[in-house]
Amino acid sequence: MSRGISQSDQPIERSGDGTDLFSKFDDIIALREGLLASGQEDPFSLVMEKVLSPTRAICNGRETILLGTYNYMGMTFDPDVIEAGKQALTDFGSGTTGSRVLNGTYQGHKECEDALREFYGMDHAMVFSTGYQANLGIISTIAGKGDYIILDIDSHASIWDGCAMGNAEVVPFKHNDIEAMEKRLKRIPEGAGKLVILEGVYSMLGDVAPLKEMVAIAKRHGAMVLVDEAHSMGFIGENGRGVVEQAGVMDDVDFIIGTFSKSVGTVGGFCVSNHPKFEIMRLVCRPYVFTASLPPSVVATAATSIRKLMHGSNKRAHLWENSKTLHKGLKDLGFALGTDEPQSAIIAVIMPDLEQGAAMWEALIKGGLYVNLARPPATPANMTLLRCSLCAEHSESEVAQILSIFEAAGKQVGII
């Protein structure tokens, strides 16, 4: 969604050939202005004036329950995590002012990668400045011109951008369709480099990939496998290692991509791998080589959080209970949901259209509940969704309150 673009009495300055380079955004500008014409709050410009806890904040002047932050394990206010960040800030300063291959590798970066290797039980770990850059860097570096990438059509934008940057041949298949994936693999020329890209949990509907079957097929056809576990790390699997652990395929995947901005509770991205040549990536991966490294306070909080997630079984159990309770409650109220059963910490509530979705979002925020309004083209099948992201720190009473706010808003807007 474009932000900060408003109507003006001044004429638009155009480039030399008379073409306005912003004209391609006219439809989305009109859509946004249409939504705001009635005085409705902008769902894409929410301001949090103060964050009170992992589950509550002051938003637009109101105390609000947070149900759209990806803070799955509630680590943002963990006392040990905060203390680690404060100490690193004192000891190492506010930033590195350099890339990892120059002056930007501090002791904290190595400790963070050590924590990741221990968490996943893998030989190699590489930390990026964002999760987006992890996908962009790894995918574009290992799959280039003449190689083939076979990926789920609903893959995250960072995955698609990594494919484009590497200039590989991209072969998409229908979402979570095992048969369609195998058909695509059979058409790849003999001897060509092949990379299958999957996600553990897909962020829009919160549904889980059939990794056991898909990874087996990929390996049978000689493809390497990359799995993005951004929305499952810390929560899914006996040790929180994601859907790859739950499906029993950790030893079969070549790369696991993840982020620190979800369950870990800070910012950054990573890739772990057992490939014997993986360390060369530090010299050939452009988004790693040419980006300033994460600040010392960030990698200190990440490392502390990751090590605590290794022992987060109680939190994981509580988060599953929250997910089951909210999914059943919303279903019983009559809302249409993205999955028949809860599969992750994401529960997507399907709206009839964007206008009613925006009205529902506004009714929720005024009732004291923040969720994500997701709209086409970011959503599958042109759906408008209210995307709910549960947290392990949500109490039973907060989940009950969430359901009460949804019921009142749904009746007010006429959704239920």
Image (cartoon, rainbow, N blue to C red):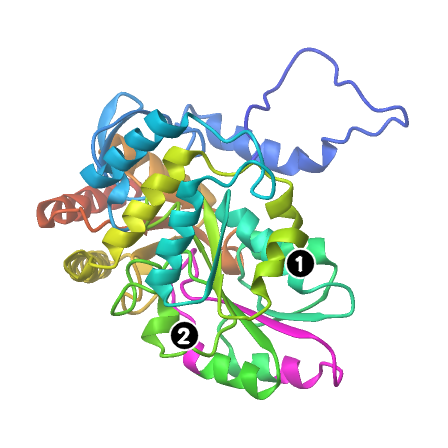
Residue farthest along the right direction in this orientation: 17
Q: Mark yes or no: residue 369 visible.
A: no
Measuring 74% from the left and 83% from the top, which residue is drawn there?
191
Measuring 39% from the left and 37% from the top, which residue is drawn there?
298
Measuring 52% from the left and 60% from the top, which residue is drawn there?
381
Q: Mark yes or no: residue 35 visible.
A: yes
The mark that comes first in sequence, 1 or 2, is 1
Viewed as shown, does residue 166 lie left or right of 58?
Answer: right
Residue 85: quarter of image: top left
| Three-letter code for the amino acid on which mark 1 is drawn | Thr
Viewed as shown, does residue 56 lie left or right of 206?
Answer: left
Residue farthest along the bottom direction in this orientation: 220
**Residue 353 part of the magenta segment:** no
Residue 347: quarter of image: bottom left
In this rendering, is residue 289 above or below 7?
Answer: below
Number of other residues with Cα within 10 Å of mark 2, as a class: few under 14, some 14 to 19, many 20 or more: many
- Work out whether residue 65 or residue 242 is closer to the camera in this orientation and state it: 242
In this rendering, is residue 141 above or below 27?
Answer: below
In this rendering, is residue 216 above or below 358?
Answer: below
Magenta span of residues: 183-212
Residue farthest along the left direction in this orientation: 397
- Work out whether residue 22 or residue 270 is closer to the camera in this orientation and state it: 270
Q: Position of residue 114 (x, y in %)?
A: 39, 55
**Residue 202 part of the magenta segment:** yes
Badge 1 marks a residue whose secondary structure is helix
Residue 321: quarter of image: bottom left
| Three-letter code for the amino acid on which mark 2 is drawn | Met
* Disc sitting over residue 250 in the figure: 2
* Dominant secondary structure (helix, strand or loop) of the stretch shown in magenta: loop
Which residue, given by chain and number where applicable, does mark 1 sit on? 141
